[in-house]
Image (cartoon, grey):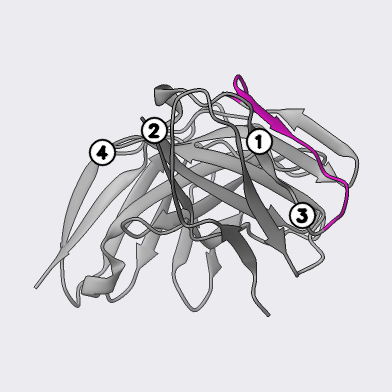
Amino acid sequence: DAKTTQPPSMDCAEGRAANLPCNHSTISGNEYVYWYRQIHSQGPQYIIHGLKNNETNEMASLIITEDRKSSTLILPHATLRDTAVYYCIVRVRGNQGGKLIFGQGTELSVKP
Amino acid sequence: NAGVTQTPKFQVLKTGQSMTLQCAQDMNHEYMSWYRQDPGMGLRLIHYSVGAGITDQGEVPNGYNVSRSTTEDFPLRLLSAAPSQTSVYFCASSYQSTGHYGYTFGSGTRLTVV
């Protein structure tokens, strides 16, 4: 699976959009981009995933660049409850089973 | 629907003791995994399974054994606990990747080895 690079920490004002970047310059054509988050001491939570088209669900939006070498997770109206570590993961769709590899992630602090 | 259930939530072991961390899911997920998380670090994959009877090693498998006799259960065994195994352990499960659902994680087991 391709390696990802994320900033170690970011701040965001409550009510504003939080934009979390991820670089995955070595991504291959059959690899998907996944985002998870981990709120303090809890198990990670799946947020969203995508291949090449932008995706949106009730939690967030995922913007993937045309060359697929980077992506941005957008939390449109961040709340204090969105304070967490956010992980960007690139993995092959297929017979990879439970081999989901986490990096260091971005620690997002949402401030009042 | 309980999701992924891990037991116990907390455990203290003495060096050299053995124990089994339990993980059960009621979602009929084929894939199950175990991770450990040390302070200030991300999650590291210990072992994983793509289905009953099939297991494989992750990034940090030494000191741990697993088996998958049923779809629902994926226990993690520490044969001889060491202080280096003090950590928070998370179990996760998922449908086959062709179904493309995210992984569901348990709430964790906090293990201290003294």
Q: Residue at x 83, y 44 (%)?
A: B68
Q: CA distance from mark 4 to mark 2?
A: 9 Å
Q: CA distance from mark 1 to mark 4?
A: 33 Å
The answer to whether B42 appears left or right of A112 in the picture is: right
Mark 4 or mark 2: which is in front? 4
- Looking at the rendered structure, whether the residues under marks 4 and 3 are on a common chain is answered as no
| Label 3: few (<14), some (14–19) or many (≥20) C-alpha neighbours in 10 Å | some
Residue B1: horizontal and vertical position, in percent? 68, 80
- The chain to which mark 3 is attached is B
What is the count of numbered marks?
Answer: 4
| Label 2: few (<14), some (14–19) or many (≥20) C-alpha neighbours in 10 Å | some
Residue A38: within the magenta?
A: no
Mark 2 or mark 3: which is in front? 3
Q: CA distance from mark 2 to mark 3?
A: 34 Å
- Disc 4 marks which residue? A8
Q: CA distance from mark 2 to mark 1?
A: 33 Å
The answer to whether B46 appears left or right of A102 in the picture is: right
- Looking at the rendered structure, whether the residues under marks 2 and 1 are on a common chain is answered as no
- Disc 2 marks which residue? A5
Specify the label residue B40 is tagged with.
none
Span highlighted in magenta in the image = B59-71
Q: Are marks 2 and 1 in contact (CB under 8 Å)?
A: no
- Give the SS element for disc 1: strand
Q: Amino acid at mark 1?
A: Arg
| Label 1: few (<14), some (14–19) or many (≥20) C-alpha neighbours in 10 Å | some
- Give the answer, above or below, for where B87 lies relative to A2: below
Q: Residue at x 34, y 60 (%)?
A: A39
